[in-house]
Image: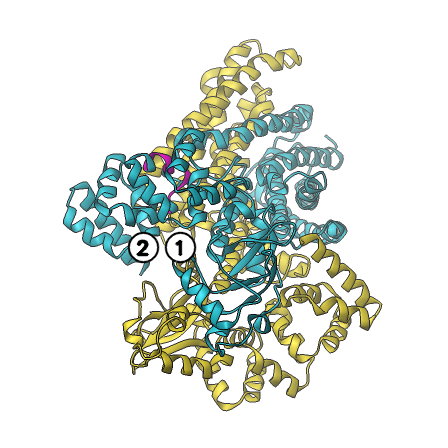
Chain colours: A cyan, B yellow
Amino acid sequence: MAEQLSEILERAEEAIERRDEKLVRELCEDLHHADLAELYEDIEPEERVFLIRLLGVEKFSDVLAELPDTLIEETLDSFQPDQQREILDSLPDDDRVDILQDVSDSKRRDYLELLDEETRKDTRTLLRYGEETAGGRMTTQIGKILAKMTVKEAIDHLRGELDSTGTLARIFVVDEENKLIGKIRLRDLAFNAWDVAVQDLVQDIDHSILATADQEDAAKMISRYDMLILPIVDESNRLLGVITADDAFEILEEESTEDIEKGAGISGDQSEETYLNTSVASHFKRRCGWLVILAFLAILSGFVMMRFEHTLMEVYLLSLFLPMVVAAGGNTGGQASTMVIRAMALGELDPEDTRRVAWKEMRLGLLLGALLAVIIGIFAVFAPPALQFTLPDEVNFTQFGVTVAIALGAQVATSTLIGALLPIGARAIKMDPAVIAAPAITTIVDVSGMVIYFTVARSILGV
Amino acid sequence: MAEQLSEILERAEEAIERRDEKLVRELCEDLHHADLAELYEDIEPEERVFLIRLLGVEKFSDVLAELPDTLIEETLDSFQPDQQREILDSLPDDDRVDILQDVSDSKRRDYLELLDEETRKDTRTLLRYGEETAGGRMTTQIGKILAKMTVKEAIDHLRGELDSTGTLARIFVVDEENKLIGKIRLRDLAFNAWDVAVQDLVQDIDHSILATADQEDAAKMISRYDMLILPIVDESNRLLGVITADDAFEILEEESTEDIEKGAGISGDQSEETYLNTSVASHFKRRCGWLVILAFLAILSGFVMMRFEHTLMEVYLLSLFLPMVVAAGGNTGGQASTMVIRAMALGELDPEDTRRVAWKEMRLGLLLGALLAVIIGIFAVFAPPALQFTLPDEVNFTQFGVTVAIALGAQVATSTLIGALLPIGARAIKMDPAVIAAPAITTIVDVSGMVIYFTVARSILGV
């Protein structure tokens, strides 16, 4: 299926390149608008004009809602004003708001002018909520009935609004002041006698969320409680709109990508464009910040090396295991921080759990340190003489192996603890724990690794 | 809201500790089963028995379905056989199958014996699909009607099955051989005359998936196409069941966590238990594998240091920037691999795109390398003399700074390219790209960084 799809998209791309109208139309006919959006992104700008013209305005409005922010304005601009109106009119209001949030202020005014008065007013209200809030993501097109209606009245009311209503998977029941009273399932209406009062069928609302809440909280609620639709209310519990499961998918995917990218020291908002369509300049901007900071931090390791010049000069064989001891700390610290950051993102760790995390990671660090110390320690006793590396006369290979083992064990144990506790510390001072990225932890434990290695060497080997 | 919840859970925990039955019952009454499952996980084993007894069998069956795999068997075992039957009977069949997949073979046989014949037969059929397949996740309790029915017959038919049907958000239409013909919305039945033929209302199915397909593909399809329910079919297009949006949330969250963990060199399946409830032994097992491999790989860097002993001895000041040059490669390589791996996970990169990725990352690597080279190069010319570090007479600080700058630029440029291309190479040989974790790339580019740094130093400084 997936293979089939990528084949169709590839054939469509080639057909567009050849300007083969008939074939393009044929291939695109059965494509979902999400697939068409992918196709649109993958082709050249001048080919995009061709594709838009071919698909027609009506079909293209769905595609537009799936495009990344950065393509929205130029795409919408390639239409005539009356076509723009047609597109904006035909979109569900959450998609329309989403699109208007992505264009420049002056364009937004122009586009709003195109809409009829009522739509414009509703859209303006929605635009007031921030892009990252539940209100900014909601749709106001919902199935809504009054508690005092009968089943027949409710069905008649809903029938009248069928066209403008996105989904009837949940129907909400409100009082005369639009305050949310409960919900009802379409099946309860469909399978009941017409004179039954809606009020007798209404079920309690278990979860709703404020319009000003973070969109991520709304998405997590939908996912946690297996909901299809989450009602959005204002402070007086008046029903403003809903967020649906498909919005939640989008929100959660964006958040996952952001967390993954932060973990690698990539800053800034996740680009909504695909990797290939993001410009080199914007990739550059997101990556360079941490790199420069980390480069200066890493020079601290160099200072430690300078400080222990004498030790390394005396027993140069120490350099055989120096990079490994340092790197092992980076690896275990990175693992520990990844585990803890993910657990925090999934809401598993409260601030009170810090001591339990420390206790767990301390034991883990000691175990991992002991394991590596034994394996690499044995290697360090027997491999260097076998490879005919030499030591100064006053030092023997057993002492050398013990040095490597102890330093490695200590480095792994401390780095594990540092990796686990730094993100928790970051959260305690209200920093986003995800920015304590693995590279930052690696750089920090590199320094401690150098100190540990040379200090242990000095005291055991007496150099 | 979120704060309120964590407060309630905390108060409930304390009440359970004090065995305050009244308060526990009061606090738990309004909790969703997902919240009760979190509470259950967070308390001590002997308190769990208390909580189960208090909640009662009926309420607890929903909680059971939300528990992590490792807790299922011991929890179910704490009930009497007739309670076990009650629990298993009351669960939707996908949850029942999920639970039976998580217990030992002998227990599974015991539990199956408890079920009535029909349920047992259905459950056995579902158990045949692998746990990671679409079939292993599906529920067979769906709204299903025959194409030849009228609206009235369809409603009567659905009414009869209301109890056993999970959701009627989509109703599927099949022919007499159970082959999937199309779908229909409950609203189309509810708002149409009773003598209309279902046939005339049926809509095409745009997407369905084979029961043997990967569960991740099913989840991605639901997310991509904004679906609530995805029908699962066999090779003859016979309707077997459905996967719903809430299953998709679970699947996608598991996959995200797995990708994040793999990226830090943590192997094995993601634990379904929370971080704190996972034993030290199982954390240890997942982390130690890569650590040992990477430790041995990192010794290669040590070999390079041994090989260039003379260079480092002659100009010991090189050690001031050695760790930084090496680490900068690890950081940029890690960023590039993270970007590429995520783009592949989101389905943005096809194998044909390799050249475009290489071209993009080559430019990025050169830009990032140039930026760092200039900044750190200037620092390397002026900082060491200011700090009263010395160089041998035949070398001056300008040459030294140029050395650092060129080596750093070259290291960053090559590491960026290596980081981007290794995951693509891994996929080409059918390896999971996510296991080319950042630590592995760091270790590899550490070696190349050492070689680059000393080689550049040797040729510019003549040592």
Front residue of A235 and B356: A235
Residue kind at label 2, given as amino acid type: His
Magenta residues (range):
A66-75
Q: Which residue is mark 2?
A: A32
Subunit of label 2: A
Q: Which residue is mark 1?
A: B224
Quarter of the image where the N terminus of chain B is located: bottom right
Q: Main secondary structure of the magenta part?
A: helix
Q: Secondary structure at mark 2?
A: loop
Task: Say if labels 2 and 1 share a chain.
Answer: no
Count of numbered circles in the view: 2
Q: Is residue A69 magenta?
A: yes
Would you call the spot at circle 1 few (<14 residues within 10 Å), some (14-19), or many (20 or more)? some
Disc number at residue A109? none
Q: Secondary structure at mark 1?
A: helix
Residue kind at label 1, given as amino acid type: Arg
Q: Residue at x 54, y 29 (%)?
A: A289
| Quarter residue B189 falls in | bottom left
Asked if A4 appears above or below A450 in the picture, the reply is: below
Judge from the rendering whether residue B334 lies leftward or rightward of residue B279; answer left or right: left
x and y, in percent, of residue A321 in the image = 60, 38
